[in-house]
Image (tube, grey):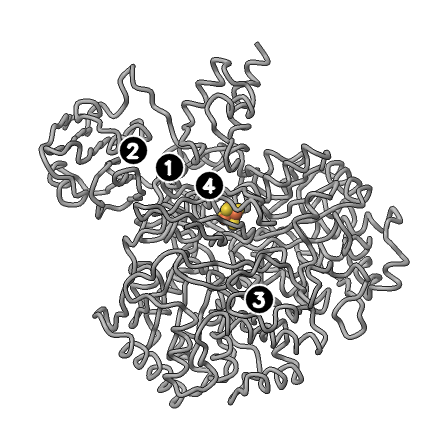
Amino acid sequence: MTTRTTCPYCGVGCGILAANQDDGSVAISGDPDHPANFGRLCSKGAALGETTDLEGRLLAPLIDRRTASWDQAISAVADGFGEAIDRYGPDSVAFYVSGQLLTEDYYVANKLMKGYIGTANIDTNSRLCMASSVAGHKRAFGTDTVPGTYEDLDEADLVVLVGSNLAWCHPVLHQRLLAARAARGTRIVNIDPRRTATGETADLHLALAPGSDTALFGGLLSRIRARGAEDRSWIAAHVKGADAAFDAACGLDEAARITGIDPSDLASFYDLWIDTPRVVTVYSQGVNQARDGTDKVNAILNCHLATGRIGTAGCGPFSVTGQPNAMGGREVGGLANMLASHLSLEVAAHREMVQDFWRAPRMAERPGLKAVELFDACADGRIKALWIMCTNPAVSLPNADHVADAIRACPFVVVSDIMAKTDTTVLADILLPATGWGEKDGTVTNSERRISRQRRFLPVPGEARDDWRIICDVARGMGFDGFDYTSPAEVFDEYAHLSTAARDLGVDLDLSGLVGLSADAYAALAPVQWPVRPGQTGDRFFGDGQFFTADGRARMLPISLTESENQTSAAHPYVLNSGRVRDHWHTMTRTSKSPTLSQHIAEPYVEIHPQDAAAQAIEDADLVTVQSPRGHLIARARICDRTAPGQVFVPMHWTACWTAKGRVNAAVAPVIDPVSGQPELKRSPVRISPFQPAWYGFAISRAEPQPDCAYWAKARVPGGWRVELAGTGPMDDWESYAQNTLNLEGRAITAIDTARGTARLVFSDDKGLEGAFFVAPEPVVAARSFLAAALATGATPAGIIAGVPSLNQPDPGPTVCACFNVGLNTIRAAVSDRRALSVEAIGALLHAGTNCGSCRPELQAIVDAATLPLAAE
Ligand code: SF4
């Protein structure tokens, strides 16, 4: 059976065909008919079939770590929340939810909290992702309207990617953009302090100083006026506040000073932007995750409003969301300061309408606590009962150690999740097993307002339940009517009805064309872009110059300049940036299950410029301590010039389940944007220093290792695990250590040199190789990809004891192409012996880059690195 569904990872929202196989596995392919991806998938989507097993799943309710029935668990949650509300009032309880929830889950969670419990203390991890875009849209347009569509990327002549590593974070959109460039010569500009895979494929990369985006776009606004390029008749008819915005904008020289970009480069970019009417400005977390994220958004919107470049094909501002259903959550009021259907909590008429519609007994009357504030309120005792759904705040929020302590301090903590052990589930009093991707049914909305169905194609495991049902069960347990849904289709229908009523209050969201869908019609619902009116879908917003403010005009805002002050000091002289890697998703609960995805980058790392590395006596592959006033992490040094001097970069994904001390947000300060409440995750002051262990280790193991040393990071490999280790204490019995903590069993052959401090141990039994352990006083030199494959390839102990392949055994090197498992060494060899001197030729020879295309920027970098010296020969 093949089921049409939607990818659960990023906001591109790709359509997927999931085909159940006779052996219980699922074959994944892109849906050729889905307008988000037309059949294309990135490496993460393509590997989804490796993530649907039940290993590590939470399959029954647990109360105080003991298995309970659902009746017991629902009663305990209802009683826990009910008692807190009775004793301390509605504001003493909170929900923290997730962009991983389906829209129907989100809808009932909001209805329960805002309409029945009577507080708006429900916030979502989307606060960390795009709350600044929401706030910026509302300030400029009157509602949270995303005017962009993916087709605009096909039709633009210039696409500016701001604070967006599209190549790794939204790979299918990036491939679409590169295809548009090949077809019509689209120019691509990337604005980012780091030179990422996106910057490497752009026509121009502007490495601005961290946090200086408002100056960069202020400078553009000034240049628009200086060149007389503003659209005066458009402004006169459709915009308010233009003069004040123009007056506040800085000139070129000041923009150049603040951004650190050469004035002539800046002027060239400004003129390119001004001279290209079809320009799309795409922005993402690099804009949103900032203390002035909302101002950054409005600085971008100002330029499009000043030139009337909005509402027509191939131009406009375009916020691209991180999560699969960040948009759906926004639509049903997932943020603590919003109501369902894009209505405003602060507007009495909106509250009254929703209260009547829901027949709600106790309506929230003011915005609730936003994410960072919410956990502060747990820490200081204001929140007595907390329910975390489908997210991992002990990892993902800034000041993460404080957040974990705050959850611990809360008297009553409920967590719904699909996994039994995460950094957050271990802090819960009650654990509720939720259904995961492939097991649940509902809708999600992608970055271009397209609603798609996620459909069930796997049996529901154990006692797991859908989130919407768990929430409704608890609501009924608390004595509330209004939660008697029997399916997500019924929830969706109520939401569509509400959106129709909301439309009449003048908001943008309109699902009137989806009201009254039968169960069959809901089951068969094809991807559809809102607004959806009867017989009419996907109208372009703002083409008529009408906005959703009281007077119908958009607002340009005067944006005060933010100097690129980065809070560094003599004690903490570096700026810590964070972000995603290509093949992992969020806190790795799903992607870490995939050996394919785990081979691209297998441990947390810190990117350091060579100049800074030299100053701190750090060498490539050393372990590095990154220390801020809030906390620290330990990660592997990657010395490269992608990150500018004075800055370091650490990926966001690693948790305490996967590494000893690699949670980047432990070192990130909880600085928030005062307008949006979004935390600044990309600009924390830190110092870096070599972490100096007594020994380093690398191991492969058929059984899951349980290391207990100062540094470790484990990852899946085919047939088992790999783990990097480092310890500070002396060790005299490596064999016992390997047996006791790495779970290496069987006969050992060993090569131990006590004088040099090196050891090589390989374990096997009658069934074959069990694992191997390599130790050295410096970072272990071993062919990791060769060893990582050894458990699955039937290697012999004698064949791997050296840690490197023999001459007749090639070492593919770290995975570059996840789809075809092609390694760096293989690709370099093909380029250096001139069998393949282009990305296309590599594809023809090795297949690398010919499926999802996510690795094509890396292939280009390998070609460039090898062919530049060849060209000089
Ligand atoms: Fe999933 Fe990749 Fe598509 Fe994002 S780009 S929705 S992660 S397949």
The amino acid type found where label 4 is placed reads: Ser
In-front residue for pair 477/278: 477
In this view, 599 is above or below 795: below
Q: Identify the mark nearer the N-term, 1 or 3.
A: 3
Percent x, y for residue 633?
Answer: 37, 49
Q: Secondary structure at mark 1?
A: loop
CA separation in Å, label 3 and label 4? 27 Å
Say which residue appears at 36% left-offset and 63% top-offset: 417
Q: Amino acid at mark 2?
A: Ala
Q: Which residue is mark 2?
A: 788
Asked which secondary structure carries label 4, the reply is: helix
Provide residue 760's location: percent of width, then percent of height. 18, 29
The disc label shown at residue 864, or none? none
State the image quarter where residue 428 is shown: bottom left
Sequence order check, earlier mark of 3 and 4: 4
Q: Earlier in the sequence, mark 1 or mark 2?
A: 1
Q: Residue at x 29, y 72 (%)?
A: 429
For marks 4 and 2, the one nearer the N-term is 4
Element assignment for label 3 = helix
Nearest to N terminus: mark 4 or mark 1: 4
| Residue highlighted by disc 3 | 330
Rounded to the nearest angstrom, the CA distance separating label 1 from label 3 is: 35 Å
Q: Which residue is mark 1?
A: 599
